[in-house]
Amino acid sequence: MPPLDHNRTPLFDAMVALAESRKVSFHTPGHKSGKGISTRFRKFVGPKVFSIDLTCLDEVDSLQKPRGVIREAQELAADIYDADQSYFLVNGTSGGNQAMILACLHPGESFLTTRILHKSAVSGMIMSDAYPVFIPLTQNRKTSLLLNDQTSSIISAMDANPEIRTLFLTSPNYYGVTLNLSKITEEAHKRGVKVLLDEAHGPHLHFHEALPMSGMTAGVDLCVQSTHKIIGGMTQASILHAKKNRIDIARLSSTLRYLQTTSPSYILMASLDLARMQMATEGKKLLGKAIDLSKRGRERIRKIQGLNCIDRHEVQSISNGDNDLDETKLTIGVEGLGLTGYQVSQKLNQEFGIQVEMADLMHILVIVSIGDHRDDIDRLVTALEKIALQSQGSVNSARVSDGFQKPYSLNTALMPPRKAFFSSQIMVPLEEALGKISADIVTVYPPGIPLLIPGEQITRDILDFLFTMKGTGATLDGLDPSNSMMKVVEPF
């Protein structure tokens, strides 16, 4: 079979051809190529975008049952990512996580995973009635970062649970730390375990040798990526990749039809088609520029008093070579300034017009992508230098993190997530929640790692952590708007 031509963009080309045909539309969407859209909206974004806001028509195929240009575009994506089959997603990697769990697990079946887990995977548990068996986390005291789990811990968990046939992992994590996916996948397959990967933050890894190995290259069975996070997809656009050996493709396809809207955005899907073409034809060059910018920024930030910025060598050293780092992520430690990450993020935004990806108590996270330029890095470094100067002389002698520990130990599950979700529930003050069963997903966002999932017992460590975080500027997802009440299973 001759190689596929990755300069082609079959879906986008068909959309443009239809828009330029000037056919009369008596179908949805009701704005009719922008003629009925708000004048303010059209004035801001321009008229052309509305002409490709289409519905399922013969010329542009259907995502529910692709047989034409969407199928061609998905085949091109599968080819470039070394997948047997790829699926365009318009509800993000969240929908892909749900689909992987629903397609691979049956009600009452258990699977292995870690706490480095997006809440969409928890919603997948609730939908499928699957039970998680958690592998302990590793928190590095030097960096205060949650590293991805060591390979040996994952292998030990598989050996301790030989009846489990599914492993769900997240790599890279939010901070860009990656797992040794090649070794883990090899060991999983030896044991008859299929590997599902949330690679939301790694759609670019496949296209440059200076980046950690991608999931599909490592041989995972299912992998979902947020094409919009680092490369050229639009927000909400993701791709799910599959290898056929251990996956029921028919069931996966059916699951996606159930989960995805029957009115998908063709603009989002076109952005996937174009992002694939861009990475296939010039990804190495574009990513090389981003990696170079990130390295230059990291070197300069590490020279600023009170700041640190972990690099690839440090991650590899801390983990004895077991973890790696995507260096397009700049995780900047700020506690040497006597400030929290939330405070530094707010200063950057309000005083310097710079918005970072996320902040936690001790860090800010900056993503350097194919859309950044040297001037952007210069502006960031200059702002951080000024914040560091402002902070000198007012730095507390105690570290921001003194006495602080994230409670990511293994929680006690008192009932399955689905049962807790559908149980009778009541709201109680945090002060009265000790020992009760959580009825909701509780996270500190970002990064959104679940402190509690439905069915887990609420402990003193978790409550102390929530009380600590209430005053920091963090978003406490799963509590009421005042952050003083939480949802629990009503006592029998």
Image: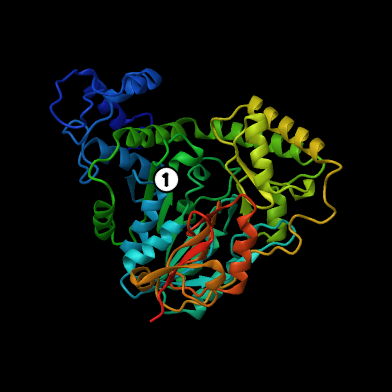
**Helix, strand or loop for disc 1:** loop
Q: Residue at x 33, y 24 (%)?
A: 49
Q: Position of residue 14 (x, y in %)?
A: 25, 27
Locate residue 119 relative to residue 76 in the image: left or right. Answer: right
- Residue 269 is situated, as x and y percent measured from the top left of the image, at 33, 37
Q: Is residue 220 visible?
A: no
User: Where 459 sits versus 199, above or below?
Assistant: below
Viewer can see residue 108 = yes
User: At which x and y percent is residue 207?
Assistant: 51, 40
The image position of residue 42, as x and y in percent, is 34, 20
Count of all numbered marks drawn on residues in the image: 1
Residue depicted at 47% across the width and 59% down the height? 478
- Could you tell me which residue is drawn at 32 percent across and 66 percent down? 128
Between residues 425 and 70, which one lies in front from this camera angle? 425
On the image, numbered disc 1 is attached to which residue?
A: 81
| Quadrant of res 39 | top left
**Which one is in front, 376 or 295?**
376
What amino acid does circle 1 point to?
Tyr
As drawn, is 144 to the left or to the right of 284? right
Disc 1 residue crowd, few under 14, some 14–19, many 20+, Cα 10 Å: many
In which quadrant of the rendered view does residue 392 lie?
A: top right
Name the quarter where the C terminus is drawn: bottom left
- Does 176 appear above or below 196? above
Q: Relative to 132, is 272 above or below?
A: above
Residue at figure coordinates x 35%, y 72% from the top left? 424
**In this figure, which colouring scheme has been used for the structure?**
rainbow
Nearest the camera: 463 or 136?
463
Rendered-image quadrant of the N terminus: top left
User: Residue 353 vs residue 481: left or right?
Assistant: right
